Amino acid sequence: ARNFNMADGSSAASNLQDDELYLPRTVVKKLIKEIVPNIRISVDTRDLLLNCCSEFIHLLASEASEISEQQQKKVISAEHVIDALKALGFQEYIEDVQAVHQEYKEQASKHRIRKKGRGKLDKLGIPEEELLRQQQQLFEEARQQQLEHDLLQQQQLPMQVQSNTNADAHTHSTTQQ
């Protein structure tokens, strides 16, 4: 484990390298405000929590990496992280982690579907509202064409019946002669 000693007066370069390993301060600050909205937290305490979060993530990621290597996998999966939580003695968090992971997968799936559908529309360069308007216009034109076709057939049907009747009458009169 890395040693996070904030009181040692370490150099600015060292702090910059360490900052690259931390969660963004604003994220940690927002998390703290969500958890304890009515309590002020000192900068030192916030930094300590930031260090603890970063150390926990490092520890969990290292354990998950070892588990994935033992299973001869090249990618750390959610299951490896869950197994790492078990190995590190954090079983009480597994149910919450699984619920959050499931929620993430559902949101990611919805996002991919929306993004995939939008990608094709975006390539056209036409706003979705305009495409819907054009679609409705095409539907209306198709309805009009169908209506005209139906009317034309209705008009032709009586003429066919009349010509068939005349032909039958003519055939009938010629056969009687």
Image (tube, rainbow, N blue to C red):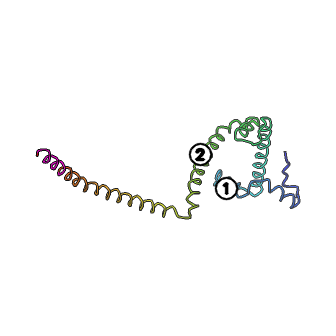
Which of label 1 and label 2 is nearer to you? 2
In the image, which disc is placed on residue 106? 2
Q: Position of residue 3 (x, y in %)?
A: 86, 48
Q: Which residue corresponds to the image point at 34% horizontal and 56% vertical from the top-left?
A: 146
Q: Residue furthest front?
A: 177
Q: Position of residue 1 (x, y in %)?
A: 84, 44
Q: Is residue 45 above or below residue 69?
A: below
Which residue is labeled 1 in the image?
30
Labels in figure, total: 2
Q: Real-space Cα distance between discs 1 and 2?
A: 24 Å
User: Which residue is at the front of the view, 64 or 122?
Assistant: 122
Circle 1 packing at 10 Å, graded few (<14), some (14-19), many (20+), is: few
Q: Secondary structure at mark 1?
A: helix
Membership of 170 in magenta stretch: yes
Q: Secondary structure at mark 2?
A: helix
Task: Answer whether labels 1 and 2 touch (C-beta < 8 Å).
Answer: no
User: Which residue is at the front of the view, 171 or 112?
Assistant: 171
Q: Which residue corresponds to the image point at 51% horizontal and 61% vertical from the top-left?
A: 128
Give the mark nearest the N terminus, 1 or 2.
1
Q: Position of residue 133 (x, y in %)?
A: 45, 62
Q: Which residue corresponds to the image point at 77% horizontal and 55% vertical from the top-left?
A: 47
Q: Quadrant of residue 125?
A: bottom right
In the image, which disc is placed on residue 47? none
Residues rendered magenta in the picture: 166-176
Q: Quadrant of residue 76?
A: top right
Q: Main secondary structure of the magenta part?
A: helix
Kind of residue at badge 2 = Glu
